[in-house]
Image: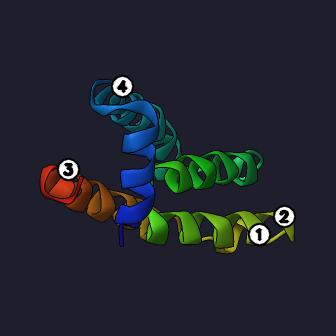
Amino acid sequence: MIDWSRAKELHEEVGAEDFSEVVEIFLEEVEGVIEKLRSPDLATLEQDLHFLKGSALNLGFRQFSRLCQEGERRSAQGEAEDVDTGAIIASYENSKEEFLRDMSSQL
């Protein structure tokens, strides 16, 4: 679910103190968009998923990023109503839980 090698790479790039801040900002920004997905605006769904995909890749949320990418692709093809936002939200919540639980032992 988490690409720990990517998370470690980012941790090494920015340092431990800044990494904590990056994680905090990531969670704040992503959770704001996740709230939008609970009642998605199909007109902005593609852009919302694009943002989430990029953010997730930065921190190593691999599975979540893949689901966002698939949803973004479907939205771009005019299939926004078929995107399973519930699965995307669940993947984020599971990824977040794993990341926060295992971060100290993995980095």
User: Which element is circle 1 on?
Assistant: helix
Q: Is residue 48 left or right of residue 107?
A: right
Residue receiving disc 1: 73
> Callout 1, which amino acid?
Arg
Closer to the observer: label 1 or label 4? 4
User: Which element is circle 4 on?
Assistant: helix
> Callout 3, which amino acid?
Leu
Task: List x then y, in percent, for residue 44.
Answer: 73, 45
Residue 97 picture quarter: bottom left
Q: Earlier in the sequence, mark 3 or mark 2?
A: 2
| CB under 8 Å between discs 2 and 1 | yes
Which colouring convention does the figure follow?
A: rainbow
> Callout 2, which amino acid?
Ala
Residue 10 picture quarter: top left
Residue 18 is labelled as 4
Q: Earlier in the sequence, mark 3 or mark 1?
A: 1
Q: CA distance from mark 2 to mark 1?
A: 5 Å
| CB under 8 Å between discs 4 and 3 | no
Task: List x then y, in percent, for residue 81.
Answer: 69, 68
Residue receiving disc 2: 76
Q: CA distance from mark 3 to mark 1?
A: 29 Å
